[in-house]
Image (cartoon, helix red, strand yellow):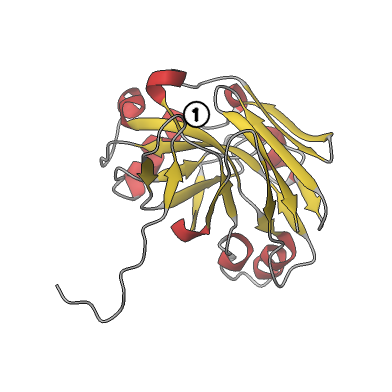
């Protein structure tokens, strides 16, 4: 088929120990999926999960164990970090049962859901969509994916974020309000999951601002970590 514009390169994520890459279709994000974070954001309890999207071309690949420069985004004076375990979907489906969800997992990575909190808050105050607070360029840093064959199913283990060496966020995957398998099931009830989808599974308490010059260091169980210097 003849196209009127040059084909756009499909976003992808590096795979640990491989020259191959994981092509990405959609990026789903789960809101308020740790109880302590839900409370700091004004919510509580095991409320039904809710989801938002980041553009797949907002992914910002970071090599494991490295420190890379990351550009401070435009239009914000209150940029927040949110460290998350990311799940890569290897097999699609609709209305997936919780008991079958793990069969759809390709692998895992550690990522950051960077947030222009002031823009998000302004949109919330006016009861408007807050895509501008979440879906900006480079707003989804991510480390390399580790296949589930090498990690095993991840249902527990530490996840941390430090800013300039100081621990800001520290949690355990076991403390997710909605487990990874439950999240997969919920997403598949609302949308048809496809191979190539990513799911950012939620962030523990301690989200807060970063400024130019700060170094964020993230790590999650079985998938290593990386560091970003905000420039």
**Which residue occupies the extreme left position in the image?**
1
Examine the image and state in which quarter residue 226 appears.
top right
- Residue 206, visible in the rendered structure: yes
Q: Is residue 68 left or right of residue 98?
A: right
Rendered residue at 59%/49% (across/down): 141
Between 45 and 196, the one nearer to me in the picture = 196
- Residue 44, visible in the rendered structure: no
Q: Position of residue 208 (x, y in %)?
A: 79, 48
Up the image or down, 92 lies above or below 9; here it is above
Examine the image and state in which quarter residue 223 appears.
top right
> Residue at label 1?
179
**Which residue occupies the extreme bottom position in the image?**
4
The N terminus: image quadrant = bottom left
Rendered residue at 30%/42% (across/down): 195
Rate crowding at label 1 as few (under 14), some (14 to 19) or many (20 or more) other CA atoms within 10 Å.
Answer: some
Rendered residue at 42%/29% (across/down): 181
The C terminus: image quadrant = bottom right
Q: Is residue 97 left or right of residue 68?
A: left
Between 47 and 216, the one nearer to me in the picture = 216
Q: Is residue 182 left or right of residue 41?
A: left
Q: Is residue 73 left or right of residue 168?
A: left
Up the image or down, 58 lies above or below 82; here it is below
Q: Position of residue 160 (x, y in %)?
A: 70, 31
Between 61 and 76, the one nearer to me in the picture = 61
Tag 1 secondary structure: loop
Q: Position of residue 37 (x, y in %)?
A: 70, 39
Rendered residue at 25%/40% (across/down): 93
Q: Position of residue 24 (x, y in %)?
A: 38, 50
Up the image or down, 215 lies above or below 153; here it is below
């Amino acid at each position: 088929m003849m196209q009127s514009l040059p084909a756009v390169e499909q976003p992808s994520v590096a795979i640990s120990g491989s020259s191959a890459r994981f092509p990405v279709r959609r990026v789903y994000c789960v809101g308020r999926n740790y109880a302590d974070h839900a409370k700091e954001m004004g919510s509580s309890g095991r409320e039904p999960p809710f989801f938002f999207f980041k553009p797949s071309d907002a992914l910002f690949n970071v090599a494991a164990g490295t420190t890379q420069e990351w550009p401070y985004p435009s239009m914000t004076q209150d940029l927040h970090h949110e460290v998350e375990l990311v799940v890569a979907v290897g097999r699609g489906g609709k209305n997936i049962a919780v008991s079958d969800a793990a069969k759809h997992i390709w692998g895992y990575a550690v990522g950051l859901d960077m947030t222009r909190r002031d823009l998000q808050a302004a949109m919330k105050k006016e009861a408007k969509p807050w895509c501008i607070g979440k879906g900006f360029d480079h707003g989804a840093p991510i480390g390399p994916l580790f296949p589930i064959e090498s990690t095993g199913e991840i249902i527990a283990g530490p996840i941390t974020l430090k800013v300039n060496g100081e621990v800001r966020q520290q949690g355990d995957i076991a403390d997710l309000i909605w487990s990874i398998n439950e999240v997969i099931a919920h997403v598949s009830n609302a949308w048809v999951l496809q191979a190539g989808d990513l799911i950012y599974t939620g962030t523990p308490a301690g989200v807060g601002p970063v400024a130019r010059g700060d170094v964020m260091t993230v790590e999650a169980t079985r998938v290593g970590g990386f560091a970003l210097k905000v420039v």
